[in-house]
Image (tube, rainbow, N blue to C red):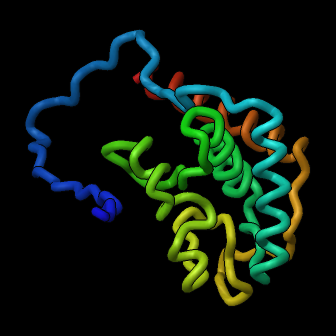
Amino acid sequence: MKALQASTSYSIGFGISRAAPPPRPSGHRRVILAQVEPSEKSVEIMRKFSEQYARKSSTYFCVDKGVTSVVIKGLAEHKDTLGAPLCPCRHYDDKAAEAQQGFWNCPCVPMRERKECHCMLFLTPDNDFAGQEQAITLDEIKETTAMLVVLVEYKEAEFLAL
């Protein structure tokens, strides 16, 4: 049986000359926060899963609940669109294949084996960003992600005004 290998993407940087001014942005929106808004049911399922797994693994949520909220929402979106809670903090060439393989489905193999969560959803107590909570409410998720949308829209308007 042929095993699938997790894909990894690499970025290669190129020098950009400062001699030419940056192109003027058009009036079109450029920020896409999510392709699909996850269902409230999936967000609730992933919220409960995250709380249970944090308790089971003796890990904690990030001191910034915005991080926790965005990751849970990303997991819920992937649960809705792919049928599995694929890690939302990585780039995949083929999300469906990755979800089927399972290596990066939450909790991913690095988390299960070494307690290494790339998303900062599950943090060990010695992590500088670990909070003291293993719980988050659906209302907290809604509030923090709504605030992020407002912040991004504000920053985008500021950028477009340049």
Look at the image and tell me in which quarter the C terminus lies: top left
Residue at 47 percent across and 50 percent down: it is: 100
Report x, y in % for residue 31. Answer: 48, 27
Q: Residue furthest front?
A: 1
Q: Measured along the vertical axis of the image, is residue 40 above or below residue 85? A: above
Q: 93 or 146: which is nearer to us?
A: 93
Q: What residue sits 90% from the left and 50% below the top?
A: 137
103 up-or-down from 131: above or below: above
Quarter in which the N terminus is drawn: bottom left
Tell me how many marks there are: 0
Residue 59's spot in the image, x, y percent? Answer: 75, 79
Q: Image quarter for residue 142?
A: top right
Residue 45 relative to residue 12: left or right = right
Please provide percent x and percent y for residue 121.
Answer: 67, 64
Residue 73 place in picture, x, y as percent: 69, 43
- In this rendered view, identify the residue nearer to me: 97 or 58: 97
Among the 4 quarters of the image, the one containing residue 67: bottom right
Which residue lies most toward the bottom here?
126
| Left or right: residue 5 compared with residue 53 | left
Residue drawn at (68%, 89%), measured in percent from left and top? 126
Observer-nearest residue: 78 or 151? 78
Q: Residue at x 81, y 33 (%)?
A: 40
On screen, residue 18 versus residue 68, left or right, reads left
- Placement of 32 over or under 93, stated as above or below: above
Residue 27 is drawn in which quadrant? top left
